[in-house]
Image (cartoon, rainbow, N blue to C red):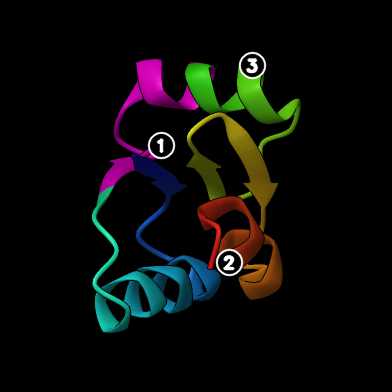
């Protein structure tokens, strides 16, 4: 399962979501600007507040790092 922590104004979040859609990767989005619990969870996982934070089955990736995402997904 892929979780992505985003904000509505983050261009790298849009790039990551577009990448997931193009590659038929299911994901669940959490908007940390509107969801305080998700923001806290993201900070605990990544130890920072920048977005996107992508959680691929427990592997935490900060930012849109396509090669790290592909590695975590086993592609």
- Picture layout, residue 55 above or below residue 16: above
Residue ID for mark 1: 32
Quarter of image, res 31:
top left
Q: What element carries label 1?
A: loop
Residue in view at x 42 percent, y 47 percent: 4
Extreme-right residue of the structure: 47
**Residue at image point 74% right, 33% down:** 48
Check disc 3 and report its element: helix, strand or loop.
helix
Q: Quadrant of the N terminus?
A: top left
Where residue 69 sits in the image (x, y, percent)?
A: 59, 61
Q: Do the residues bearing badges 3 and 2 touch, measured as CB atoms within 8 Å? A: no
Sequence order check, earlier mark of 3 and 2? 3
Residue 52 in view of the camera: no
* Residue at 66% from the left image edge and 36% from the top image edge: 49
Badge nearest the viewer, 1 or 3 = 3
N-terminal label among 1 and 2: 1
State the mark number for residue 44: 3
Residue for badge 2? 70
Measured in 3D between alpha carbons, the distance from the residue under mark 1 to the one under mark 3, in whole angstroms, is 13 Å
User: CA gap, disc 3 to disc 2?
Assistant: 23 Å
In the rendered image of this protein, does residue 56 appear above or below residue 43? below
- Residue 21: x, y in percent? 25, 75
Left or right: residue 48 versus residue 69 is right
Q: In terms of secondary structure, where does tag 2 sit? A: helix
Up/down of 6 relative to 45, above or below = below
Mark 1 → mark 2, Cα distance in angstroms: 24 Å
When the figure is inspected, residue 57 is found, relative to residue 28, above or below; the finding is: above
Residue 17 numbered mark, or none: none
Q: Is residue 61 left or right of residue 19?
A: right
Badge 1 crowding class, 10 Å Cα cut-off, few under 14, some 14 to 19, many 20 or more, is many
């Amino acid at each position: 399962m892929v979780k992505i922590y985003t904000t509505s104004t983050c261009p790298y979040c849009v790039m990551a979501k577009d990448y997931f859609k193009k590659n038929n990767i299911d994901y669940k989005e959490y908007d940390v600007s509107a969801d305080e619990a998700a923001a806290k969870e993201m900070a605990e996982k990544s130890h920072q507040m920048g977005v996107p934070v992508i959680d691929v089955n427990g592997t935490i990736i900060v930012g849109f790092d396509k090669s790290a995402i592909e590695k975590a997904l086993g592609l």
